[in-house]
Amino acid sequence: MNYAVGDVIAPFTIESVSAEAMKDWAVFLADPNPIHLDVEVVKAKGLGDRVINQGPINVAYMMNMLMAAFPGGTIEAMDSRFLDNVYGGDKAVASGKITAVDGNRIDCEFSLDIEGRGTVNAGTATIRLNA
Amino acid sequence: MSDEAEFPPAPQVAGTSLDGTKIFTVSAEENARLCRSVGVAPAADGTAHPVWYYVATQVAMGKTVAGVCETCEFDVEDGPMMGSSGVRFSGPIMVGQPYKVGGEILSLVRKKSRKLGVMDVLTYRLRLHPADGGDAILETDNVWVLPRKELA
């Protein structure tokens, strides 16, 4: 497959961010922070009225987009900035485009956007295409 | 007068070791569960989802999240926030492969922002190695923001 600078990467969409998944991630991360598990705690802290997705889940959504866009490719490097929270029930869309092509390496920029609220994560990645 | 002169300096924590002693292994069941939780199927080639970079290094580093905060003289109950996360892979994370973590705090810098007031910006680096030795398969730099409400 040929890739070119400016090519748009097919989006990866989560129709509704899962509060149940956050419970799994509390176990994966060994981190039972209640802002991911208990709406009442989120409200009490003035952070909103829905549970807040763990940050690395948002990274995973963006990784999923990259892996789907470059089948058999490998993420060599990835940097992402956390700009805002993602909440349970949000519709999240990861999207991006190619910014450089150098042999079998492809640079991309990407973002994670929430329907109605805009960009909550943004970053860059380098993908190595495997023969 | 500079902002820095308005409040005490951040604790001197650069260089603090985050080397872990735990062995971390991604099981096929855990990987499948994680993949389902983020909307994809697990890979069929034995590689784990790459986001395990974050999970494995956090769980098997030498301090808990609360412990890292304590080192920075910050109460985890005050709400550390993720600022950014970067990773460089030299190889994939494999299901069933035992790993260990090495790392250190790189910096803790006190700043003032209009949105958050006084805050400490913590940067730490972690590496994931095969448990039986050898070069790291990945290195990650994470940045957390620690709001210093007491200095606001």
Image (cartoon, rainbow, N blue to C red):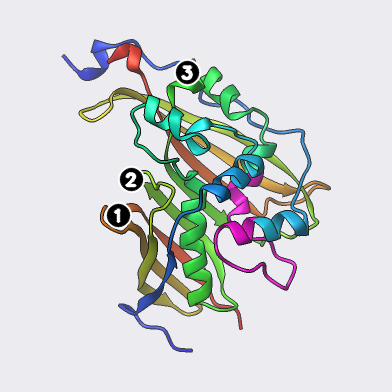
Labels 2 and 1: the sequence-earlier one: 2
Circle 3 — which element? loop
Marks 2 and 1, how far apart in space?
Answer: 7 Å
Mark 2 crowdedness (10 Å alpha carbons): few <14, some 14-19, many ≥20: some
Q: Is residue A53 left or right of residue B147?
A: right
Mark 1 crowdedness (10 Å alpha carbons): few <14, some 14-19, many ≥20: some
Magenta stretch: give its range: B34-56
Q: Is residue B129 above or below residue B112?
A: below
The three-letter amino acid code for the residue at tag 2 is Leu
The image position of residue A57, as x and y in percent, is 51, 51
The three-letter amino acid code for the residue at tag 3 is Phe
Residue receiving disc 3? B74
Q: Are marks 1 and 3 on the same chain?
A: no
Residue receiving disc 1? A119
Mark on residue A108?
none
Marks 1 and 3, how far apart in space?
Answer: 29 Å
The image position of residue B36, as x and y in percent, is 62, 61
Q: Nearer the viewer, residue B101 or A63?
A: A63
